[in-house]
């Protein structure tokens, strides 16, 4: 198993969080694809469709992280840049090796 996948799975152990991510991640990817396609066809009037997909996709992932008890990856990145503490793996799942 690739290291990135094992790290990702370690951060998404709660079954509800994992299910929300399985739904939310494709929605966010679809939002980007739809935005590119709409812009290629110059359909600025349909801006709300990719925005809605992106918002719902991220909302599902955010709910998953609230359930999980850890920070989202993007939030971790910003907290690292700012030198702030972050929670990569929920304390309820962390082992001595992961802390």
Image (cartoon, grey):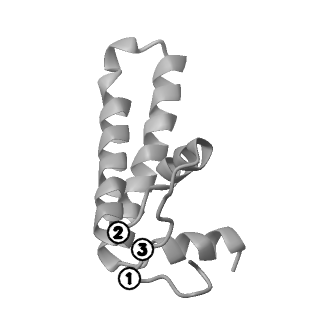
Q: Earlier in the sequence, mark 2 or mark 1?
A: 2
Q: Return the x and y of residue 61 as percentages of the image width and height.
A: 36, 56
User: Given contact means CB atoms under 8 Å apart, are the residues at marks 1 and 3 in contact?
Assistant: yes
According to the picture, the residue beneath numbered tag 3 turns out to be 90
Horizontal side of residue 21 vs 52, given as left or right: right
Q: Which of 83 and 42 lies nearest the eye of the viewer? A: 83
Q: Return the x and y of residue 75 as percentages of the image width and height.
A: 47, 48
According to the picture, the residue beneath numbered tag 2 turns out to be 69
User: Given contact means CB atoms under 8 Å apart, are the residues at marks 3 and 2 in contact?
Assistant: yes
Q: Quadrant of residue 81?
A: top right
Q: Return the x and y of residue 29 as percentages of the image width and height.
A: 49, 45
Q: Residue at x 28, y 58 (%)?
A: 63
Q: Which of 77 and 5 lies nearest the eye of the viewer? A: 77
Placement of the C terminus among the 4 image quadrants: bottom right
User: Given contact means CB atoms under 8 Å apart, are the residues at marks 2 and 1 in contact?
Assistant: yes
> Of the numbered discs in the image, which one, if any, rests on residue 92?
1
Distance between mark 1 and mark 3 Cα atoms: 5 Å
Task: State whether residue 11 is above or below residue 34.
Answer: below
């Amino acid at each position: 198993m690739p290291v990135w996948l094992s790290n990702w799975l370690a951060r998404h152990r709660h079954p509800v969080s994992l299910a929300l991510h399985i739904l939310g991640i494709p929605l966010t990817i679809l939002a980007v694809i739809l935005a590119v396609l709409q812009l290629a066809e110059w359909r600025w009037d349909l801006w709300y469709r990719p925005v809605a997909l992106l918002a719902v996709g991220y909302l599902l992932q955010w709910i998953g992280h609230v359930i999980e008890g850890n920070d989202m990856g993007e939030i971790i990145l910003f907290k690292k840049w700012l030198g702030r503490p972050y929670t990569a793996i929920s304390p309820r799942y962390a082992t001595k090796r992961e802390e």
